[in-house]
Amino acid sequence: MKTTATPGAGAVARQEDWTIESITEEFLANEFKLSRRKTAFLVQAIERTIQKAWDHTLDEKIRWAPASITLGLKLPECQDNTERWLEAPWLECAAHVADLLSPLPEQSEMGYETRRREMCAALDAPTLATQRHKKRKMFATRVDSDTPEIIDSIAKEFGCLRINGSGETVGSAGVLLDKIAQGHLTIIPTSPD
């Protein structure tokens, strides 16, 4: 059993006890620094988790990091540039840390430039998988009406979500557009014009 000293804590931590949460917290506590071993551990754990999410085999419950973590990381908005999130999934926070410490040398297989963006998209993929088995829904909107709320409600029905400033889960037009751009959703005209 190998043990390693945790800098500044005066305690001994076993590598088997490392989690993405503990590594992310340590990154903040150590002024945005991690050892090479912990960086490698985090990058590998995040890449495995992203793959599991895409494969719909991620069986762990999504846990939310507190505002102290997201604010400490100065986490830029992932899905909506109009609101500041006070909480985010731990997986997203850890993917952001992995990007800061070890940026992707090129786009991922799925076409993402950062692990964080891919994690955001991959965590929504299981919702889309369940949508495939439901009856297809069609929506029509008028351009002259107040469309942001309509589009957000459509996004919510397709599982494209974000957390607003009040901590409520709401639809996200940005995530909906990302999924359309990535080919996960297809727009089919209901009538020829």
Image (cartoon, grey):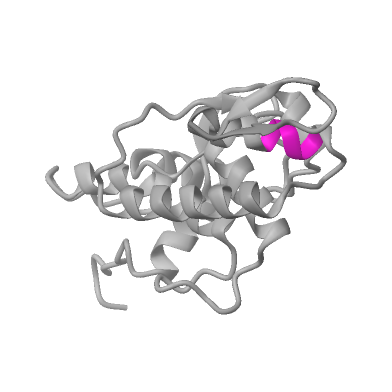
Q: Is residue 25 magenta?
A: yes
Residue 3 in view here: yes
Residue situated furthest front in the rendering: 1
| In the image, residue 17 above or below residue 43 | above
User: Which region is colored magenta?
Assistant: 24-28
Residue 112 drawn at (x, y percent): 51, 69
Seen from the viewer's position, the closer of residues 48 and 34 is: 34
- Horizontal placement of 187 versus 44: left or right? left
Q: How many numbered tags mark residues here?
A: 0
Q: Is residue 142 magenta?
A: no
Look at the image and tell me in which quarter the C terminus lies: bottom left
| In the image, residue 84 above or below residue 168 | below
Residue 151 drawn at (x, y percent): 48, 48
Residue 62 drawn at (x, y percent): 44, 30
Seen from the viewer's position, the closer of residues 146 and 27 is: 27
Seen from the viewer's position, the closer of residues 115 and 80 is: 115
Q: Quadrant of residue 183?
A: bottom left
| In the image, residue 63 above or below residue 113 | above
Seen from the viewer's position, the closer of residues 57 and 167 is: 57
Q: Residue at x 44, y 39 (%)?
A: 153
Q: Residue at x 68, y 55 (%)?
A: 36
Residue 53 drawn at (x, y percent): 34, 48
| In the image, residue 143 above or below residue 18 | below
- Horizontal placement of 118 versus 71: left or right? left
